[in-house]
Amino acid sequence: MGIRVAVAGASGYAGGELLRLLAGHPEFDLVAATAHSQAGTHVTAVHPQLAGLDLTLGVTDAAGLADADLVFLALPHGQSAAVAAQLPAHVKVVDLGADFRLKDAGLWQKYYGGEHAGTWTYGLPELPGQRAAIAASTRVANTGCYAATITLALAPLIASGLASPEDVVVVASSGTSGAGRSAKVNLLASEVMGDLSPYKVGAHQHVPEIKQATGATSLSMTPVLAPMPRGILATVTARFAKEGDPQKVLQEAYAGEPFIHVLPAGQWPHTAATSGSNSCHLQATVDVDSGRIIVVSALDNLGKGASGQAVQCANLMFGLPETMGLSVFGVAP
Amino acid sequence: MGIRVAVAGASGYAGGELLRLLAGHPEFDLVAATAHSQAGTHVTAVHPQLAGLDLTLGVTDAAGLADADLVFLALPHGQSAAVAAQLPAHVKVVDLGADFRLKDAGLWQKYYGGEHAGTWTYGLPELPGQRAAIAASTRVANTGCYAATITLALAPLIASGLASPEDVVVVASSGTSGAGRSAKVNLLASEVMGDLSPYKVGAHQHVPEIKQATGATSLSMTPVLAPMPRGILATVTARFAKEGDPQKVLQEAYAGEPFIHVLPAGQWPHTAATSGSNSCHLQATVDVDSGRIIVVSALDNLGKGASGQAVQCANLMFGLPETMGLSVFGVAP
Amino acid sequence: MGIRVAVAGASGYAGGELLRLLAGHPEFDLVAATAHSQAGTHVTAVHPQLAGLDLTLGVTDAAGLADADLVFLALPHGQSAAVAAQLPAHVKVVDLGADFRLKDAGLWQKYYGGEHAGTWTYGLPELPGQRAAIAASTRVANTGCYAATITLALAPLIASGLASPEDVVVVASSGTSGAGRSAKVNLLASEVMGDLSPYKVGAHQHVPEIKQATGATSLSMTPVLAPMPRGILATVTARFAKEGDPQKVLQEAYAGEPFIHVLPAGQWPHTAATSGSNSCHLQATVDVDSGRIIVVSALDNLGKGASGQAVQCANLMFGLPETMGLSVFGVAP
Amino acid sequence: MGIRVAVAGASGYAGGELLRLLAGHPEFDLVAATAHSQAGTHVTAVHPQLAGLDLTLGVTDAAGLADADLVFLALPHGQSAAVAAQLPAHVKVVDLGADFRLKDAGLWQKYYGGEHAGTWTYGLPELPGQRAAIAASTRVANTGCYAATITLALAPLIASGLASPEDVVVVASSGTSGAGRSAKVNLLASEVMGDLSPYKVGAHQHVPEIKQATGATSLSMTPVLAPMPRGILATVTARFAKEGDPQKVLQEAYAGEPFIHVLPAGQWPHTAATSGSNSCHLQATVDVDSGRIIVVSALDNLGKGASGQAVQCANLMFGLPETMGLSVFGVAP
């Protein structure tokens, strides 16, 4: 018998992707999936792509979750702490929300408001030392999708001393599933198709997480909503702190990593190639005019940016092969 | 050691999807992939979504393929026969092209032109008797993508006597990957996005295949190019030949089928739910005004419509579990 | 001084398109635009594409509208009658809703529910006799967008006796703006992009309107939501009642019509070519297998399918050139 | 009788948009449109959106163009000089290509290769002094689409001394029509839909034009291909050179400009709102973390980015009202 797994917040997009991954995972047995307004509904009425999975959504409470060995929390930001507090210590938990990512309570309050719930092990296995830390944890705070995309591009450059941590400039575009499944006019297909739309310009709440994870000391990030269901493309530019080859730094940092692909010279990451996978594609160059380092990073916001990453962390937490149940390959075109 | 597999025509979209499926298949070992103008190129330069797969495309000839136990031919229509002729009899072959689908040489000549190459076992396992026929074959002609979508909707209705084989009317819209990967102005993103465009109206070459597979005696099919990369949605309408419930007929026909999902009443198939999977979703009703049976069928043209179907057939041909290496679940949103 | 015009329901998509057309119309002076929840908002906060238009949305009531010479009602179905009842008789009104389209009160009740409000002149100028009827009316019921697309394709074929009014089969796909601007999960970009989704299969409320306008006696219509913001493509098939050339019938019916383009042989309508215009593109052929007539019709659901059509009717009602303020040409790609 | 106008290179996307605008222009009479491989074809076979326009494409040579009072050159980069050289001096010319934009012959050779053809008046009327210069010219070099988007955002900030001309960082995403109408695999709908794809990273040929037009001394620009037919969204970040309010600087720079809309505080430009129009939408803020100025700029690459801009320049060259035949309002959704 396998490891018993529950998903709280299974009616959203990250929840649906978790169910898809778990349904195909050799060791994790999906025993419960819960939701808020959709509780009582058959999962295929909410996620028609899961036709063939026989499961009814339950109510998100401790009773429905505590029986599992592993719980994924895919709840709206700010709701994980209350649920997590009710789970027994022996139940392992991966939180896909922002609640436990930040170390600095002041920054939490400034960017999210409300009481800071605490800090869990940060769920990005490719950061130095983080793989072991995750494996040793029972509570893991999964990265945000923008943070994963940008951190994978930037962290090795700053850590190696190649890039200056000052004045990093990022523009990152996300597919619409990153904005969640709530019915809002600005997320309607009529508004989004054929459109690029920036938002939260000048003050995005993920900046503190990115600075914490990368060591950047000053970073401007402009997020853009793009007319596609999945994918994030981040263009990260930084000034050189010393001479060197940014592509080489990335190659060395990620040698042997199964999910991080520094592309051959001349090939640039694009989001569709990562769709449905747990991979992140990277490429770097030096801008001929400004002399800035430019790194482009692409991943699936629901894959390596959320649910895939969460399963990868859970694999580590249970001593399973890190790639189990996850695909390196994208579904394209 | 597993079964040695080669893919001819690996640079196209069906070829790329085959490589993705084979790379994750537990028993099939991908030993060669060949192409025409792209021969000599690393596979990830052609299919960036396969980053992590180390393989160089070879030349499509007997030498590059005959060493395999199983060959998939994903070549342009009309090119399979010449390649197949050079393969030893013991090599099992699944042809994704149209060359060997039709039984009637006259119809082949009328709709495709040129010499008829012959007739192979038709690769649609869910047709009565066909599963066993495929398992016993060394040569299988995979269904066309439109034919698979429409046949799965229509065949049981005609076979059961519920629907008249006369005057079937079909409108089917396909994502652009169904049109292949050749550079044509009408397939440019600028032309396709925001657009629905019918083509080959009044005389589509897949009509004879659909009639042969379903028993329809007269059938109008209008294909439409839709602004999405994958997916076919077919609306099939037919007149009643006797009284009965079309949904029930479909449910009975496909009871126990792993990949065919007759949806619960009130839920209608839509293409995104099948994307990346080998599933086909079906629903039926009776039109209140005309009294016609309406069946809607959705699948992924590269999945159950092409490469997924081909792997399913190959599983049968080698006595493997039919679902091996294939996903029932779609990648959505 | 020009003709004073007001738009009720200006915050929706049809309302926004009306504002755009009226802002560029040489004789109509936009004096008021009203909304429900958006009353009090500047129009550019609701319709950013109208930047440069200085107008604040008012409340939808008689006081805000009665001062105009012409009122367009772009309200949700069922809300026009109450507003119209409060407008003085001398104010000319074009209703873009369904309230006054049907002649048969019983059909209204069956398909829409509630009390039938009455019947106004049907606003499709290209139907025989209708141009004069509209010019002589002070109250006009604009066509529905599906009804316009299908009626323009079908009416001349039935009227000429070429097509049988029995057993017409239609599949029509619409861009998402046809579904309105209310925040619903199934209309989210994440759900719609990459997807084709049928709805109201077997019983669409526009069927009675289409039958009334075309003379069809039995008609199956399957509507499909397509991943594009604008446009409807209808495939209309009918059986021959007598011999003849359907393309010729269409050409004769629409000779001299400025907005109806029967395309040259071999060219098929596609939606993008009509985007932003008031044109409808048509083509017809005979299916080689079934012998059915196939007509394909394309238009912009917000143009000839709604707001453009409404302006065309208003031009007639005020004795202005019918094409004034309207474009024949689409905005493509 | 109006001004006689010819379009060379009418089969491309910018050419098609020019024809659309000219067909609706009150003073410009379209007398000829020429093409290369499409010469001899009816214009509606190439641009179906122009159904209703009766015109056959001619051959691009002096004979076909010299008879006009005004010639628009919408040819591939590098082909304008040869055609322009054959036109009489009294024929006014607007070149939509890059040939005559740069002042520095060395930069031309470095970024485009080949002989530098010369320098014409730069066709961006909103730059200080440029309106009069265009009005006085018989030869005008229209801006590039990226250059227009970025220059309108950046030029006033540098000119006012607010922004440093050093270390400007730009990421700009474009719809696919900006890449032209040639049949290339990377522009196929199957590749582009659902995808964001950066290109020419680190060395884009438009950088010298942007630096020349804005006064920037060092500028990194990363272009991204976005899954939409039209529109450019540029995120421009720069460091402060002195204290001040960037939004105010933009408002003052563009007060009274009919096509440049600095949006109300809190509203951000998005591309769909400018589609089909000649407008550019702008907004600015200060990034809370990095302290950088962030300006976002949106326009239609075929409108204010190419053909609309060209008509605006031509209006000025003939002493017509600058806005004649152009729309301030976008076609949305």
Image (cartoon, coloured by chain):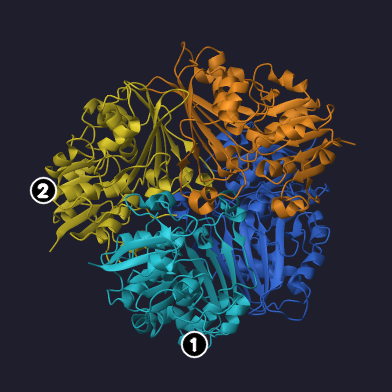
Chain colours: A cyan, B yellow, C orange, D blue
Residue at mark 2: B88
Q: Quadrant of residue B127?
A: top left
The answer to whether residue A295 is seen in the rendering is yes
- Which x, y percent locates residue D62? 65, 44
Res. A243 mark: 1
Q: Residue at x 55, y 21 (%)?
A: C211
Q: Residues within 10 Å of mark 1 (few under 14, many from 20)?
A: few
Q: Is residue A305 left or right of residue B279?
A: right
Element type where label 2 sits in the image: loop
Element type where label 1 sits in the image: loop
Q: Residue at x 53, y 57 (%)?
A: D226
Residue that lies at the very extreme toward the right in this rendered image = C1
Q: Quadrant of the N terminus of chain A?
A: bottom left
Q: Which amino acid type is marked by label 2?
A: Pro
- Which x, y percent locates residue A317? 33, 77
Q: Nearer the viewer, residue D154 or C184?
A: C184
**In the image, is residue C100 above or below residue A84?**
above
Q: Is residue A176 left or right of residue C47?
A: left
